[in-house]
Amino acid sequence: MPYGRLVIDPRLRGSDGEMKYVLGGGSLLHKLIWPGGHTFSGICKLYADYVYRRYRSPTIVFDRYATGASTKDVTRPRRTEGVMGCDTSSRIFGIGKENSPKKVMSSEILQGGHAVRSSSDPGPLARTLSCRNDFARSWIFVEDYGLYRFRGISVHLSPDCTSNAVYTQPDIDPPLVQTIEVDGVGKYVTVCNNMNILHMCEVLVMGCPYSKYGDQCNMSCGHCDDVWCSLSDGACPGECKDRYTGPKCDKSCDGCTDISCNKDGCKDGCVTGKRGNYCDKSCSPNCKNNVCGQSDGFCTEGCMTSYWTDTCRMNCSTNCIESICNISTGSCVKGCRDGYRGQDCNDGCPYSKYGDQCNLTCGHCDEVWCNLSDGACPGECEDWYMGPKCDKSCDGCTGSSCNKNGCTRGCVVGKHGDYCDQSCSQNCKDNLCRQSDGFCTEGCVVGYSGNKCQNDCPANCKDSVCGQSDKKCTDGCVTGKYGDFCDQSCSQNCKNNLCRQSDGFCTKGCTVGHWGDHCQNECPANCKTSVCGQIDRACTDGCLTGKYGDYCDQSCPPNCKNNVCGQNDRKCTAGCVPGKHGNYCDHTCPPDCKNNVCGQNNGFCTEGCAVGHWGDECQNDCHPNCKNSMCGQIDRACTAGCVTGKHGYYCTQLCPPNCKNNICGQSDGFCTEGCMPGYWTGTCRMNCSTNCIESTCSISTGSCVNGCRNGYQGRDCNDEKEADATGEEPDISGTGIGIGLGAGIVLGAVGALVTVYVCQRVR
């Protein structure tokens, strides 16, 4: 039949008059345009839908290719872009004019709608698949209801149907187009069926070359360990080669610590800057030190400056000082830039405020707000204020005369500068300095030099006084130094380490043992404490014990105390040895001198007398009533007190007879240990009241200490009591003591009379 035309035979009409169609398969193939990118299964469905819509229940016949060249031989390479698989000649299909319609089976390996060229390389994957025609009773036609039936089919990776099937279709009608995924390796792919009828439009065997996978076979397998990867998703069925990880073994272990990994991931964590199970992801570039958690990517050591959140991907507010904010909250750690406030420093300042956190107050701008950043006033200042911010008071200006640019008539004492807001150096004398540069016009206070008295005087200047301009020590040097700047040391032998500033002469003499202008010579050996005259070397502090003379080269008299005598006259200057007196200690002391010591000049007993004696030379005896026979050396008064029963200066008077233990004070005769019972006063000459219980009364007041006898009352118990209504006298003997003692205490302490009545009725 002509190409592209459908010939309808009237004999094909049914008894009901409905037309029956027989379609030429070759013509049908040219009827529709193949959309780009479709697979043969998709194109098959396209044809099936087309035929069903137009012809309902047609019969489709495929003729065998004619011998020799034909339009099909040209068209097929064009449609497959020259990439062809199995031969489609009559040898394969076995369908011709002399044959009945048989099964049509294509075992081409197709990829994305294009046939894959067979290879002569007999590799492990199905690279040289053959096309077979083993089942003579398989027919291709379309039933009236227009569905394809695939019941009973099975797929084998072998040249026949005897091997185990890698897929078997369940005994149900599948969808119109069915994709069977078989993930296997073999040289052959055979589709078999166990039924007489196989309704099949096309068989597409999807395979890939070695180390490739995917729908388009354009993806490379990873580093599987001696095993091919899955053709569908590239997964490695076994382990990975060394230094690779992941289900597809396509991830390098370079990000793993010590490159230690297996198929499941990195075993010992990630190197710095990496994260994830396979350590193939990078930490946030803002992580401090490029360190983050392997599982969550959190920056474990914090963020780089100006970033926050767990992964440090949020920017700190640009208004944060130094762009530093809290990693958890984003609040500005060091505060806000001038003119901003709030936790994140995004709020501006209110009226009259500026600066960091808006905590600075604008100056006295004349009816204009100040700059939020630096507080500068754009216009003039209010009266009495000056400066760019109008925040400087004119109080420092002479007469408070000023404008925005500064003081117009100079500064008050202690101030300098355009605004007179700078203080003169505290080291300026009288606190006076020049307005323009702060020069101390009256000089410096003690210890300083320089234009602004900013420099210390040389450390060794006496009293820290030096010239303002030349720093020379004008009042001399500290001890041990000399020279204009007191930077030279006096001789170490100068007494008190003092020398003349101009030449180093030892002005206070020499240290022990030396003499000369610079105390460079040694003193005579017998000089006391080795001290001698700086100029003549004479022993100026005397001589060593036992020596005298200008140079201490003569011996002292033998009885000199401690063998010491006058350097010039050899008199015993420290006194005499015990028992001797006189200038040269050549006289004997009186015999009764205490410790046998007497005055060197007159022989008087200077340390007192022996016990029982008195007088200049202890020639008299003490009074026998002196206690322990001790009396004064000059006035013979008893110095240790009197014997019992005596008193007085010389212990010649008797103590009062009522003194307890017959003891009284030496000076006044008062009974110091109290009175005998029944007596009182200091000398125990007054009788206690006979109405006192046990006749006992206070030695100082006479009040009854133990209370009154029955029938009497009062401090001294001399007042009679009146009987009560019962005719009985109240018993207050228990309270009398309190009254007496209380009264005595009060009278003794404050000199006042207090009467206390305490009554207790006896029933």
Image: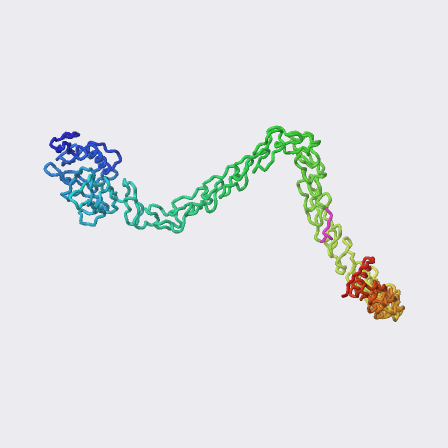
Asked whether 317 or 590 is in front, the reply is: 317
Point out the image quarter for the C terminus. bottom right
Q: Is residue 494 magenta?
A: yes
User: On the rendered structure, is 304 left or right of 42?
Assistant: right
Asked whether 462 or 231 is in front, the reply is: 231
**Above-or-below relation of 258 to 105:** below
Q: Is residue 404 magenta?
A: no
Asked whether 440 or 40 is in front, the reply is: 40
**Above-or-below relation of 117 to 381:** below
* Range drawn in magenta: 493-501
**Above-or-below relation of 496 to 431:** below
Task: Name the residue at the front extreme.
Answer: 726
Secondary structure mostly seen in the magenta stretch: loop
Q: Residue at x 80, y 63 (%)?
A: 741
Whether residue 581 appears in this view of the structure is: no
**Rendering coords of residue 400 (x, y %):** 69, 31
Whether residue 222 appears in this view of the structure is: yes
